[in-house]
Image (cartoon, helix red, strand yellow):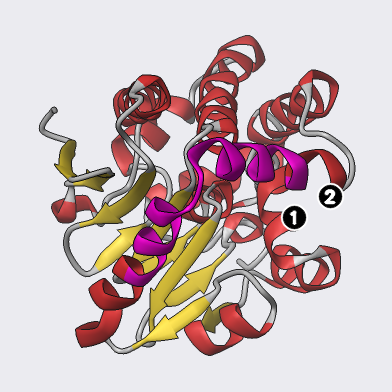
């Protein structure tokens, strides 16, 4: 457990809770390392049959922490490659966790937070949550999270929401398949419990094998060559002139040059 994460257990169900409500549960390099370690721990615990990823506060996850973005704004390409590789490794560990995973979405999900949801096997959202892939507004691209988000929402929806950075609501997230269930806030825990109960009552080996089966059959594997391309893609765009301008404009709360 850390200041950023809370880990708790209820029988065979583990809950990993993002606990940075003051920054809308945005993540930085420390949180990425902690989440990676937490999911590795859940994978190793024989008694854990399901993992719930939750959050505290009005937002589930707003993507990258602003202080982290300020540091990244001056990173070289090589530094960006290392930084993006850590995020890619976290998402891979989450996605390949042998235990079934559920995103319990109690609030808004933006940018990199979309990757957290997409890397989970299932997602249950409150009806008031909003979603957004906002990267292009900053002159960036959602490269590292793209293998998971595109699998979750489909290429057709990704063409729209990657390119427009429109905000969409939980109803639309459900329509395009990004989340499985949309419920009122008072029904969120009951719906998550319904899923964890179903998972806990099934054969652990069969559940683990089914998860592997879906990943193998669904299409191109999220493997080293693809991950490498996404890591290079975000490093290149971050160090491009428009990428640097977009991030600086965001941090300085002004319009980027292409809107001035």
Instruction: Give the image quarter of residue 48.
Output: top left
Q: CA distance from mark 2 to mark 1?
A: 9 Å
Residue marked by disc 1: 151
- Compared with residue 33, is residue 6 higher up or lower down, i.e. above or below? below
- Which quadrant of the figure contains the N terminus? top left
> Which stretch is magenta?
194-214
- Compared with residue 87, is residue 202 higher up or lower down, i.e. above or below? below
| Residue 242 placement (x, y as % from top left) | 69, 44
Q: Main secondary structure of the magenta part?
A: helix
Camera-near label (2 vs 1) is 2
In contact (CB < 8 Å): disc 2 and disc 1: yes
Residue at left offset 43%, top offset 26% = 43
> Is residue 141 visible to us here?
no
> Along the horizontal axis of the image, is 26 left or right of 218?
left
Badge number at residue 218: 2
| Residue 49 placement (x, y as % from top left) | 38, 41
Badge number at residue 133: none
Q: Earlier in the sequence, mark 2 or mark 1?
A: 1
> Along the horizontal axis of the image, is 72 left or right of 196?
right
Determine if the magenta segment contains residue 109: no
> Along the horizontal axis of the image, is 151 left or right of 191?
right
């Amino acid at each position: 457990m850390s200041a950023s994460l809370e880990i708790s257990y209820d029988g065979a169900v583990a809950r990993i809770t993002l606990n940075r409500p003051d920054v809308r549960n945005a993540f930085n390099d420390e949180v990425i390392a902690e989440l990676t370690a937490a999911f590795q721990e859940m994978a190793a615990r024989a008694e854990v049959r399901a993992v719930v990823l939750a959050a505290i506060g009005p937002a589930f996850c707003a993507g990258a922490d602003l202080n982290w973005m300020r540091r990244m704004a001056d990173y070289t390409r090589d530094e960006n490659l290392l930084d993006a590789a850590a995020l890619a490794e976290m998402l891979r560990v989450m996605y390949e966790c042998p235990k079934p995973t559920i995103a319990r979405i109690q609030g808004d999900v933006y940018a990199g937070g979309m990757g957290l949801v997409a890397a989970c096997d299932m997602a249950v959202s409150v009806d008031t949550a909003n979603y957004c892939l906002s990267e292009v507004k900053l002159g960036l691209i959602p490269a590292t999270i793209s293998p998971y988000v595109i699998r979750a929402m489909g290429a057709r929806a990704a063409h729209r929401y990657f390119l427009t950075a429109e905000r969409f609501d939980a109803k639309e997230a459900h329509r395009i398949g990004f989340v499985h269930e949309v419920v009122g806030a008072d029904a969120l825990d009951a719906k998550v419990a319904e899923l964890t109960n179903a998972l806990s009552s099934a054969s652990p080996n069969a559940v683990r094998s089914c998860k592997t089966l879906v990943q193998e059959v669904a299409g191109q594997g999220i493997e080293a060559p693809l991950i490498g391309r996404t890591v290079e893609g975000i490093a290149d765009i971050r160090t491009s002139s428009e990428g640097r301008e977009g991030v600086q404009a965001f941090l300085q709360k002004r319009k980027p040059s292409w809107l001035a």
